[in-house]
Image: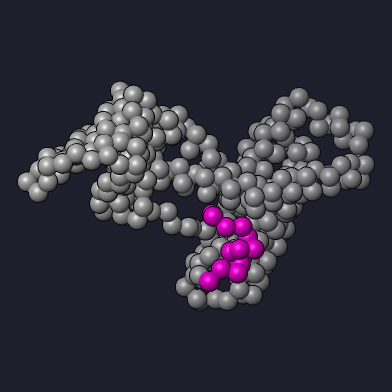
């Protein structure tokens, strides 16, 4: 919803908004993957405890019996997370930013409605049909220059700080103090300067981990190292989540049990965020970042494993 400006009608672009929102989901899931994994194991454990299925499973299988299955599941989850972060999230995020920018600029330019497009104090366009921002059988009135344009089709282009309206194969009638003329053209471009146009700037989510590590900006490099740490954390949480699934406890104690583990995971992420802050401000170096995170991760993991027993 942060894309939208409520003074405009959304009826013509609501599907664009829905499509754009879906494109950001892989990037949205990426930083929450460890939490989502733990939450999923909590819910599954709660269901198994509710039906006493854990006791039945433990009677017939030991951890050693299903260790190989655990390895396959861990490898599969880690690979899916890696594929999402390094490929799908990067690709869809770029499409999302371009689409978001298009929607934002279209709102600022104006939204075609009932075969008309009006840009305040600039021009009005009337057309028979519109497909992908290309208008067919166009009649346009440019107020300031006193121009009337008829063309087979026209399209909108956003370039630098301009909106360019590109008319193709038509006629232009000029009626103003400087000129009274009628001319035919193959291509005619009318530009509207607008300081409100937003341009695409590449941020951290546009790059995979390797590209971040070798980036020339410090905060991008640090974000790349944060990605590596998140992979280590996800791998550890995969193992812990599989252990959580087969923990047998009374129902009353499950909520407390889940809350403790979730809070410990939250502590890991908060501490890591603080270290990233120190890195960005050049208060620590990369080896210290990994060392402190390793100490914190080891202590929290020990506490979680003790809780699981």
Which image quarter: residue 138? top left
Q: Is residue 107 visible?
A: no
Which image quarter: residue 157? top left
What residue appears at the point 60 percent right and 69 percent down from the top-left corner? Answer: 214
Depth check: 142 or 114 in front? 142
What residue appears at the point 45 percent right and 42 percent down from the top-left corner? Answer: 99
Q: Where does residue 241 sit, x and y in percent of width and height?
A: 73, 44
Q: Is residue 177 visible?
A: yes
Left of 25 or right of it: where is 131?
left
Depth check: 43 or 84 in front? 84
Residue farthest along the left direction in this orientation: 177
Q: Where does residue 44 sit, x and y in percent of width and height?
A: 71, 33
Left of 247 or right of it: where is 263?
left
Depth check: 144 or 293 in front? 144
**208 drawn magenta:** yes
In this picture, which residue range is highlighted in magenta? 205-216
Depth check: 174 or 18 in front? 174
Q: Where does residue 228 sit, x and y in percent of width and height?
A: 66, 61
> What's the colour scheme?
one colour
What residue appears at the point 50 percent right and 70 percent down from the top-left corner? Answer: 217
**141 drawn magenta:** no
Query: Which quarter of the rendering shows the N terminus?
Result: top left
Left of 104 or right of it: where is 221?
right
Q: Where does residue 27 sit, x and y in percent of width and height?
A: 56, 47
Left of 150 or right of it: where is 15?
right
What residue appears at the point 39 percent right and 36 percent down from the top-left corner? Answer: 133
Which image quarter: residue 77? top right
């Amino acid at each position: 919803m942060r894309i939208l400006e409520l003074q405009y009608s959304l009826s013509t672009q609501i599907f664009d908004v829905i499509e754009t929102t879906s494109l950001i989901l892989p990037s949205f899931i990426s930083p929450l993957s460890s939490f989502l994994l733990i939450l999923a194991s909590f819910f599954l454990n709660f269901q198994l405890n509710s039906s006493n299925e854990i006791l039945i499973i433990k009677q017939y299988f030991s951890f050693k019996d299903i260790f190989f299955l655990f390895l396959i599941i861990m490898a599969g989850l880690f690979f899916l997370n890696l594929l999402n972060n390094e490929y799908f999230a990067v690709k869809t995020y770029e499409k999302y930013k371009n689409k978001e920018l298009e929607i934002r600029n279209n709102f600022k330019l104006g939204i075609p409605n009932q075969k008309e497009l009006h840009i305040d104090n600039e021009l009005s366009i009337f057309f028979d049909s519109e497909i992908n921002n290309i208008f067919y059988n166009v009649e346009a009135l440019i107020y300031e220059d006193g121009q009337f344009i008829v063309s087979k089709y026209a399209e909108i282009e956003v370039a630098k700080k301009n909106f360019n309206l590109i008319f193709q194969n038509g006629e232009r009638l000029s009626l103003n103090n400087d000129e009274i003329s009628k001319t035919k053209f193959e291509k005619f471009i009318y530009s509207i300067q607008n300081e409100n146009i937003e341009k695409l700037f590449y941020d951290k989510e546009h790059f995979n981990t390797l590209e971040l590590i070798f980036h020339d900006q410090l905060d991008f490099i640090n974000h790349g190292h944060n990605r590596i740490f998140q992979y280590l954390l996800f791998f550890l949480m995969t193992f812990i989540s599989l252990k959580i699934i087969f923990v047998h406890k009374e129902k009353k104690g499950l909520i407390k049990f889940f809350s403790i583990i979730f809070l410990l995971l939250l502590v890991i992420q908060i501490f890591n965020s603080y270290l990233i802050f120190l890195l960005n401000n050049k208060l620590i170096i990369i080896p210290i970042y990994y060392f402190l995170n390793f100490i914190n991760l080891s202590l929290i993991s020990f506490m979680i494993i003790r809780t699981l027993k």
